[in-house]
Image (cartoon, grey):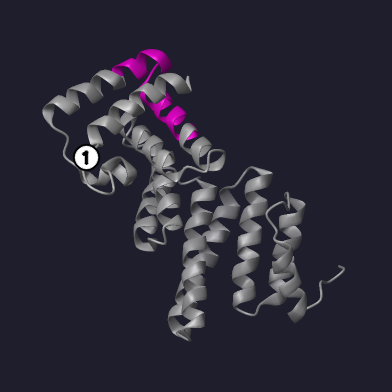
Amino acid sequence: MRQSLYAFLIIICCLCSGCGKTRPDELPMHGGVDFTSGQKKIIEMRIQDAVKQFGDRKTAAEKAVESGWYYYNHKHDPKNAMRWFNQAWLFDPNNAGAFDGFGFLMAEKSKEDEAITYYKKSIELNPRNALGICNLGRIYKNRAYRLYRQRKREEMLKNIDEAMKLYEKASQVATIDGDLGYIYYQWAVALELTNNYAEAWKKIKLARKHDGQFIEPRFIKELLRYMPESQE
């Protein structure tokens, strides 16, 4: 299945070539580029081919999102991952997974404001997107940490408060153990930043309960510097 979608991706890459140092297909939503009428016809033909293969545009979009994460997680290729997320968006402009991918890759580039916009759109389209909600919280948490180092306490507290609300929301809609483990760990990191060590340990225990693979040993070591773990 990936081979057929890949043929479509090659078409889009060719359409977008020669457009500058950063090609539109390496930017979310193709960077807002206006396709020519000829390009639109080619894209529509390829979309119809995908519909014939997968049954509808939504399913084709979901397959493209899967390919995007495959290229990011297994090929370590964010540029092609972005192309797949763009392909998903072309198949279905209301695919939450495409916007989730946009948000993640923008965050990786430290483009926080753009990442927040895309994550919010993803959550709007899928309010039960636990990982998207958590990753949005992580952006606010990372921003809070930076503000903490800059000694901008008031701004830091606003961002950390937003992160906490999002972690709580994510924990309420998550249904997969691995997701919950990740959410509780990120929540613990945010709590440690506010010197709330007791609550941070509680979240670490929940993270372990729900699959603790995301817990970083160096964080536990740091947390132990401030407060021993309760044996309760």
x then y, percent, for residue 112: 39, 62
x then y, percent, for residue 91: 33, 29
Q: Residue at x 43, y 30 (%)?
A: 64
Q: Which one is in front, 175 or 39?
A: 39
x then y, percent, for residue 66: 49, 33
Q: Residue at x 23, y 31 (%)?
A: 15
Outermost residue toward the left in this view: 37
Outermost residue toward the right in this view: 231
SS for dot 1: loop
- Give, as a three-letter code, the residue at label 1: Gly
Magenta-highlighted residues? 48-66
Residue where numbered disc 1 is placed: 18
Q: Which one is in front, 24 or 168?
A: 24
Q: Which one is in front, 129 or 140?
A: 140
In magenta stretch: residue 52 = yes
Q: Which one is in front, 102 or 156?
A: 102
Q: Residue at x 12, y 28 (%)?
A: 37
Using residue 141 as the reference point, say whether residue 99 is left or right of it: left
Q: How many marks?
A: 1
x then y, percent, for residue 177: 68, 45
Assign the C terminus to one quadrant of the image.
bottom right
User: Taking the image as drawn, is residue 96 in sight?
Assistant: no
91 lies above or below 81: above
